Image (cartoon, rainbow, N blue to C red):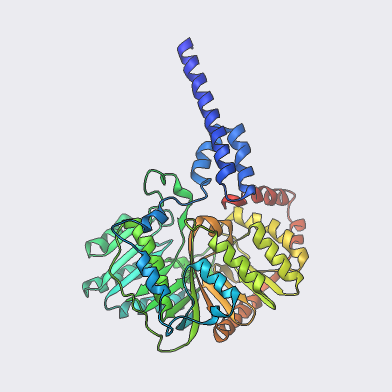
Amino acid sequence: MDTLHITLYGMVIIFVELLGVYSAYHAVLYTRTSQGAIAWVFPLILFPWLALPLYWVFGRSKFEGYVSARREEDLNLRHIVDELSSYSEQFISTLSHSADDLRVLEQLAKLPFTKHNHAELLIDGEATFDAIFAGIDSARDYVLVQFFIIHDDQIGRKLQERLLAKLRDGVRVYLLYDGIGCYKLPNEYLRKLTDAGAEVSSFRTTGGFRARFQLNFRNHRKIVIIDGHTAYVGGHNVGDEYLGRDERFGHWRDTHVKLAGPSVQCAQLSFVEDWYWATHEAPTLNWTPQAAEQGDKDILVVPSGPADELETCGMFFVHAIHSARHRVWITSPYFVPDAQVICALQLAALRGVDVRILLPEKPDHVLVYLSGFSFIEETEPAGVQFYRYGPGFLHQKVMLIDEDFAAVGTANLDNRSFRLNFEITIAALDQPFAAEVKKMLEADFSHSRLTSADEMQDRPWWFPVAVKLSRLMAPIQ
């Protein structure tokens, strides 16, 4: 090797090492948690050739461009928020006027509690898709559809067929999907819709030069809105497995909620902000709230994501758990909480609160499943109880606090939902609705078994080691 090549090789090595040091400096300044910063600093300095590409894809803690997109001069979405925040007393709930706990939730959501809403639990895939398809069939003006995953399978094609039928009737269709979650979706599936007149777009997490490395962020929301008067939000994506047709998982346990009333406009705002980020356009929609024909429930819609100034999703969980006096029941397919949530669960259990976490028996992500054991080991001594759901795969994201507060949405109890995903949660302060959620969860617990961290002792010697190693990856799970 001649002197020139040696010099160039040396300069490349020095450049990569300096870039690794700079990236470590960047991680210290901007990584949201100290654990995450430590997890990145040492590899970036010691193994920059390997760590640098991983850091610039997985180490970003803030979603660039989303907030500024809201402020573009050619569209000011702020007026929509102002309209929603200035509802007449006919639609704004007065509960938060006398309860600091509720005002905090409104500040996190940046939306008000609304009243005169109807909320209906949709348990499992058949009930959910029957309701969604009936809603689509009833549409007269527009249908908004947003999913993290859409498969070109039996249920996916049924969705496509119904949307095509509405397009033939002159109904506008807007379909927004996550580009990573739908990486298997054939272009032909989308082309049929666009050729028929549908507006279709991926969420485009990598839009713009500064956002070119944002591959680790996901839009995990699942929303369907009909004419601005009915909304469907919950854990189901569009795929046959969500109807229990997957041989690996069998029965798929999940929950959606159907909304009517002024809360629908709040869910619609979440869709429009995502749509504007993806397309820099906003459709003309119905922003006039209407009281639901049945029901008088107080509902708060809580959109959350990595573009938020605060960590909305994690703070929502922490605040709800701290407010509990008798019961905290949470179901989630993944249990990879941060230190604040762990502390909140421990304190609630020490106060004598009935704290139960329902998790799946069957894992779909091995790394998350393994790391969850270490968090069980940490929270169990305080009195937190853990259950494993047995009949199939549990995918629902539901929380029940005491006798009157329940939440159904898309957020898991993990770092990805807290910091990396765009999520949406429907929170209801309503005793009858909470009673329905309680009855549903009691049925789930009856099909579950009480588990313990001691189960690791019955596993092979390598299992506890794998659990601890997986825990190290918690900041990016």
| Residue at x 28%, y 69% (from the top left corner) | 284
Residue 114 image point, x, y percent: 46, 79
Q: Farthest residue in the top direction? A: 2
Q: Can see residue 326?
A: yes
Quadrant of residue 388 within the rendered picture: bottom right
Residue 175 image point, x, y percent: 33, 64
Residue 38 image point, x, y percent: 64, 43
Quadrant of residue 443 within the rendered picture: bottom right
Residue 203 image point, x, y percent: 38, 56
For the image shown, how many numbered marks are present on the structure?
Answer: 0
Q: Nearer the viewer, residue 244 or 32?
A: 32
Q: Is residue 279 left or right of residue 179?
A: left
Quadrant of residue 47 within the rendered picture: top right
Q: Can see residue 254?
A: no
| Residue at x 49%, y 15% (from the top left corner) | 7
Q: In this view, does 60 lie to the left or right of 47?
A: left
| Residue at x 58%, y 56% (from the top left corner) | 415
Q: Farthest residue in the bottom direction? A: 294
Reply above or below: 335 against 286.
above
Q: Nearer the viewer, residue 342 or 154?
A: 342
| Residue at x 38%, y 66% (from the top left corner) | 271
